[in-house]
Image (tube, helix red, strand yellow):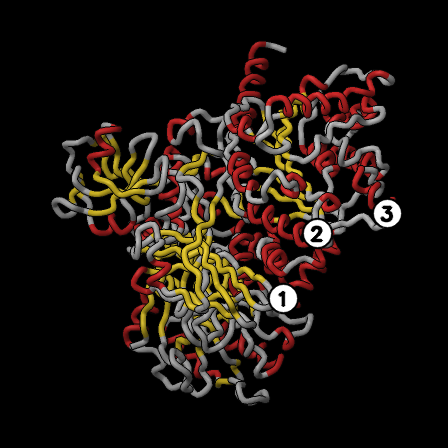
């Protein structure tokens, strides 16, 4: 190999290493009844040639030796694939070779090079020495009859009180395994699990964690259930995890002392039956099914989840006047906050409201990147966690806004707050879903920043994936750059998650080389769009213009997120630290295209002036104007039923004369004049120079200025109307086709707009199905989702920076309806094609 090739190999190697350390890995957690499952977990998850320290919380040492352990070690390594190793570990366990009392030995001296066993606390030094000697004897006694290639392992097996371990600094890669039977001893209190847990999650080098319930060693099913609730509550309190739970994996040949005891008495070995668990445990698992993987008998697990969904009515939560957002958050301006209402079928004896707050103000999820230490500290943990705090106990099903508002990070003003209700009734203890409220004190970009007050600082947040979301949209916290990026994405600017340098590349420079004496002039639009202050390795945003109006000065207030919770402080504080800075703004072109979208238009019974002068001016000025045609066009044929809308062809002239360019036909009235009526509708629309959207895919690409826009329209209301030969896309029957069309249009177009006909009529409340479909559409490539059908306008929100207009409401309907039905309006959109940014404004038909 020549020198240039060798240099290239070195560069590539360095880049690969950097990529590995710059991607935050979730903490793998394994939960099962038997500790033998930890053998499978660690053997399949770890690099068998690396060295790890295992910290074992257990009533027993599990230090027994395996017969022929060298053959076990060889079997683990002499495999061709991960799947083959999994098969080997399962076979070793199913054959009875690996037991809950001997699972550690064949994982030594690699990958486990040292074991620290914690049997409890408060043992004397003599007792510790005796326990340790006994453990080492069990680990090595077979050497007398069966030599082991690695020799003695006993010296690497140490015993310590928990109080001693707390003072240790473990520099090696760390594994922790907890056998819950430790808390079933008289000498260890169940509450000790809390302090043990706090120590575990604060270990910066922790790489894997396992739990064994060990039901045979527990006092009762009730204690086992209580332990399982405690384990899952702790695990779900962590943000960056991968949780594997195996409720149906049991030792087929259990030869442990306790198992032999039961068998000798002719009693079945007790196991924890998840299908007979308490309602509180099933509630907990139901609320987190997307965070738990079950591999063994996964079909049976899914059936159980479905059964729980049918049998158990979860506690329902709602906030008056508010609608839960697509990401599960309840968002509101401070002036619109409302009480939290619980709906619970049953007699309530007590309701405890818990506040779930960050366990720390800062985390470092990239501990191998030294830069994180300078922004946090060397003592912060890598695992984003939260703790519970009781805020009130009551019997009232309503938690007032005055009560929960006190616990906002900025009391009665703004920030993020997470709450959970624990309801005690005569029947059982139940828990509600976690309610996350994000309250803003401003509008737009600054409002999106204010709703993050109280979020922890997470160095490396851009590398985290949680519930399928990245960066700040994982809802765990942020760092300085992603704090601002979250704000931009919440108003529709789809900046990529990243560091200050990467954010800088997505913005325009308003002023450079600024210092304490600089006076930078800006305008109201700059402040509204977001004025970013770039200090090199740190970024902030202008929060309040305190000095001369529209002049950036040291006394102005800025908001930033660094090393702790977000804070507001004078610009002068950051200037004194960083000396110089640049001022950046969103990079938007000066001449956006204008689009206009109208909702349901029924021309059946329409008169000539269906749009007001104001609306006609908006339509005519638009580069593209599209409405939903909520009727069929036909001269003679008419369908049956009370809500059957068929208009004469000449009524289409009202749309053409107003300047409408396209009509969406994919809706539940497309066949009101039958199949022949659909053909006539298309002919009359096209004859007038308008585009029929949602029927036949070749009509979905439109040229607007120098840009190509693809539009996909489908109906999700009445699938029973259509057969397999329909020319209209229908959700969910055509789900795959819809997805393929979006992906194909992304290749040919500058933007893809999806227009679904969906939701429940006559309500402002967005349905769960609308949110589910919208999330899917964005994930497969939609740049905007603009819906219709409900006849009443619904809210606009952003998901991953993509605008979702759930319903345009009616643009014109010749009949009267409930409140909001006749509030005709259109959506005026300024489209910045280079950024794919949609700036929206409602224009009423007045």
Query: Quarter of the image containing the N terminus?
Result: top right
Q: Quadrant of residue 280?
A: bottom right
**The one of 139 and 475 positioned closer to us in this rendering:** 139
Q: Is residue 191 above or below residue 756?
A: above
Q: Earlier in the sequence, mark 3 or mark 2?
A: 2
User: Label 1 belongs to which residue?
Assistant: 312
* Mark 3: few/some/many CA within 10 Å (<14, 14-19, 20+): few
* Label 2 residue SS: loop
**SS assignment at label 3:** loop
Q: Which residue is mark 2?
A: 220
Decide which of tag 1 and tag 2 comes sooner along the chain: 2
Q: Residue 349: image x %, image y %?
A: 51, 67
- The percent position of residue 136, horizontal first and vertical second, equals 72, 21
Residue 112 image label = none
In this rendering, the answer to whether 422 lies above or below 243 is below
The residue pinned by badge 3 equals: 265
Gap between marks 3 and 2 measured at Cα: 17 Å
Front residue of 411/496: it is 411
The span from disc 1 to disc 3 (Cα, nearest Å) is 37 Å
């Amino acid at each position: 190999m020549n020198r240039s090739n060798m240099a290239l190999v070195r560069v590539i190697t360095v880049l690969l290493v950097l990529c590995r350390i710059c991607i935050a890995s979730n903490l793998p957690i394994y939960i099962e009844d038997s500790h033998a499952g930890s053998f499978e977990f660690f053997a399949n998850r770890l690099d068998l040639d690396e060295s790890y320290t295992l910290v074992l919380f257990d009533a027993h040492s599990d230090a027994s030796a395996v017969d022929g352990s060298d053959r076990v070690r060889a079997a683990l390594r002499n495999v061709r694939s991960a799947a083959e190793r999994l098969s080997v570990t399962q076979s070793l366990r199913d054959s009875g070779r690996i037991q809950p009392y001997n699972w550690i030995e064949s994982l030594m001296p690699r990958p486990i090079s040292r074991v620290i066993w914690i049997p409890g606390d408060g043992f004397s030094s003599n007792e510790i020495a005796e326990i340790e000697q006994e453990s080492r004897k069990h680990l090595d006694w077979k050497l007398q009859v069966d030599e082991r290639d690695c020799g003695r392992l006993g010296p690497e097996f140490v015993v310590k009180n928990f109080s001693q371990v707390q003072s240790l600094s473990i520099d090696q890669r760390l594994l922790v395994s907890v056998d819950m039977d430790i808390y079933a001893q008289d000498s260890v209190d169940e509450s000790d699990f809390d302090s043990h847990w706090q120590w575990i999650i604060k270990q910066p080098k922790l790489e894997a964690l396992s739990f064994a319930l060990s039901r045979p060693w527990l006092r009762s099913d009730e204690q086992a259930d209580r332990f399982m609730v405690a384990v899952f509550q702790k695990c779900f309190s962590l943000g960056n995890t991968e949780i594997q739970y195996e409720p149906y994996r049991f030792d087929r040949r259990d030869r442990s002392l306790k198992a032999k005891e039961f068998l000798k008495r002719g009693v079945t070995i007790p196991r924890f039956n998840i299908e007979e668990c308490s309602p509180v445990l099933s509630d907990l698992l139901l609320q987190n099914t997307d965070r738990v993987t079950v591999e063994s008998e996964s079909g049976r697990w899914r059936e159980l989840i479905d059964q729980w969904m049918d049998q158990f009515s979860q506690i329902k939560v709602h906030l008056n006047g508010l609608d839960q957002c697509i990401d599960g958050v309840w968002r509101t301006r401070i002036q619109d906050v409302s009480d939290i209402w619980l709906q619970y079928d049953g007699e309530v004896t007590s309701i405890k409201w818990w506040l779930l707050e960050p366990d720390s103000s800062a985390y470092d999820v990239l501990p191998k990147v030294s830069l994180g230490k300078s922004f946090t500290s060397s003592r912060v943990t890598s695992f984003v966690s939260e703790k519970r705090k009781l805020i009130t106990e009551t019997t009232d099903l309503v938690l007032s806004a005055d009560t929960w508002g006190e616990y906002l990070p900025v009391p009665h003003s703004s920030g993020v707050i997470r709450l959970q209700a624990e309801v005690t009734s005569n029947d059982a203890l139940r828990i509600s879903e976690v309610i996350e409220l994000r309250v803003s004190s401003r509008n737009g970009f600054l409002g999106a920043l204010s709703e993050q007050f109280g979020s922890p600082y997470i160095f490396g947040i851009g590398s985290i994936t949680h519930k399928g979301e990245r960066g700040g949209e994982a809802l765990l916290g942020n760092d300085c750059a992603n704090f601002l990026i979250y704000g931009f994405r919440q108003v529709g600017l789809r900046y990529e998650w990243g560091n200050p340098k990467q954010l800088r590349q997505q913005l325009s420079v308003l002023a450079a080389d600024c210092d304490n004496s600089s006076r930078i002039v800006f305008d109201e639009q700059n402040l509204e769009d977001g004025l970013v202050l770039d200090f090199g390795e740190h970024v902030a945003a202008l929060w309040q213009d305190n000095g001369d109006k529209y002049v950036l000065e040291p006394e102005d207030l800025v908001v930033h997120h660094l090393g702790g919770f977000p804070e507001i402080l004078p610009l002068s504080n950051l200037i004194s630290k960083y000396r110089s800075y640049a001022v950046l703004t969103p990079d938007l072109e000066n001449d956006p295209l204008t689009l206009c979208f109208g909702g349901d238009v029924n021309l059946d019974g329409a008169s000539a002036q269906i749009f007001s002068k104001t609306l006609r001016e908006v339509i005519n000025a638009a580069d593209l104007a599209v409405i939903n045609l909520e009727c069929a066009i036909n001269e003679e044929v008419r369908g049956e039923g009370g809500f059957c809308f068929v208009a004469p062809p000449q009524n289409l002239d009202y749309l053409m004369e107003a300047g409408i360019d396209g009509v969406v036909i994919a809706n539940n009235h497309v066949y009101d004049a039958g199949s022949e009526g659909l053909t006539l509708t298309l002919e009359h629309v096209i004859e007038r120079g308008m585009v029929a959207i949602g029927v036949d895919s070749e009509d979905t690409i439109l040229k607007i200025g120098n840009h190509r826009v693809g539009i996909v329209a489908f109906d999700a209301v009445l699938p029973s109307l259509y057969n397999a030969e329909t020319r209209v896309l229908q959700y969910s029957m055509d789900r795959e086709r819809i997805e393929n069309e979006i992906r194909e249009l992304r290749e040919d177009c500058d933007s893809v707009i999806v227009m679904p006909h969906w939701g429940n009529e006559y309500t402002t409340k967005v349905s769960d199905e609308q949110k589910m479909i919208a999330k899917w559409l964005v994930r497969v490539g939609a740049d905007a989702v603009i819906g219709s059908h409900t006849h009443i306008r619904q809210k606009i929100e952003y998901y991953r920076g993509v605008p979702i207009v759930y319903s345009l409401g009616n643009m014109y309907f010749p009949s009267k309806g409930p409140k909001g039905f006749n509030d005709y309006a259109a959506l005026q959109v300024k489209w910045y094609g280079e950024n794919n940014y949609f700036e929206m404004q409602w224009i009423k038909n007045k």
